[in-house]
Amino acid sequence: MTTPSPLASPMAPGLYVAATPIGNLQDVSDRLRTAFSQADLILCEDTRVTGKLVTALGLPSRPLRRYDDHRGEAARPQILEALERGEAVVLVSDAGTPLIADPGYKLVAEARAAGHKVFSIPGPCAAIAALSIAGLPSDRFSFQGFLPPKRGARSNRLEALKGRDETLIFYETGPRLAASLADIASVLGDPVVVVGRELTKLYEEVVDGPASALAAQYQDAPPKGELVLLIGPQEVTPPSLEEADPLMKAALQTLSLKDAAAKVATDTGLKKRELYQRWLDRDR
């Protein structure tokens, strides 16, 4: 049995989190067109940007209201009242999928807590688009948003990401790209990175290379447009058995020798049997 679409006419009441194109208008889905045509209210980061999109699609105009980090606190009670009246409210960002480094999660959380239906109208997302064409492992990945703009905070953030066995995805701005790449090279050991620029647009570009080399390349020529920065999984060298002694000692405070060896083996990549035997030999 097929589940009816929540976009059956008339549009069902609820909050619709809708993805918009990140560049190419041909990526607009039929569901987004329907939602724009039938919505009682469309929430936008910038009403001018969304208004141009609606016009470009040749759709009838619907009420647009600004919803961003600055106005969200004041706007949410009125939006929840609209949902309570049974209205269909569509949330969009300027481009891509809302909530992905864009406003919206507090509204979604409050709408769900109030018992309102929340629907997804999926579509473009720059982070996922970049991952799909970067040539980096995609079985494990995490989106990390924007790196901090100041060097000290950025270096601390990168230190916390050392040793991650997954592809890391960031959004970045052109003016900050070279500095971020230089810090990635310094903190993470100059890994190969991928920079995706203007994805789906006419001047789409995907560049890869050592972080230090790309930092030098972009130092005097910051790229224009929207950027996605990716770092592949980092190779981690397991510590020696001797270096694992403090970890074993700490684990043995609460665990048996067998369980402590298993935990430290999982945390470090060392062999459980070797950890177990080393500690037995110490006690003899």
Image (tube, grey):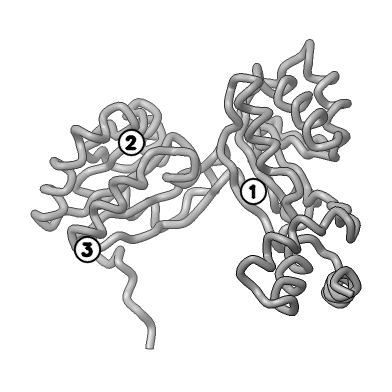
User: Residue 143: x, y in percent?
Assistant: 59, 47
Disc 3 marks a residue whose amino acid type is: Ala
Q: Determine which of the numbered discs, if any, sits on residue 44 in the image.
A: 2
Q: Determine which of the numbered discs, if any, sits on residue 9 in the image.
A: none
Q: Determine which of the numbered discs, if any, sits on residue 12 in the image.
A: 3
Tell whether 109 sits left or right of 63.
right
User: Residue 139: x, y in percent?
Assistant: 71, 63
Disc 1 marks a residue whose amino acid type is: Ala
Tell whether 154 sits left or right of 16.
right
Secondary structure found at label 3:
loop
Quarter of the image for residue 119 reads bottom left
Disc 2 marks a residue whose amino acid type is: Cys
- Tell whether label 1 touches label 2 (CB within 8 Å): no
- Tell whether label 2 touches label 3 (CB within 8 Å): no
Badge nearest the viewer, 1 or 3:
1
Which mark sits nearer the N-terminus, 3 or 2?
Answer: 3
User: Residue 272: x, y in percent?
Assistant: 82, 74
Quarter of the image for residue 227 reads top right
Secondary structure found at label 1:
helix
Quadrant of the frame with the N terminus:
bottom left
Q: Distance between the residues labelled 3 and 2?
A: 20 Å
Secondary structure found at label 2:
strand
Which mark sits nearer the N-terminus, 2 or 1?
Answer: 2
Q: Furthest-left residue in view?
A: 85
- Tell me what residue is drawn at x 60 percent, y 31 percent: 147
Name the residue nearer the viewer: 144 or 58. 144
- Tell me what residue is drawn at x 81 percent, y 28 percent: 186
- Tell me what residue is drawn at x 21 percent, y 54 percent: 88
When the figure is inspected, residue 274 is found, relative to residue 80, above or below; the finding is below
Q: Residues within 10 Å of mark 2 (few under 14, many from 20)?
A: many
Q: How far apart are marks 2 and 1 (CA)?
A: 22 Å
Q: Determine which of the numbered discs, if any, sits on residue 129 in the image.
A: 1
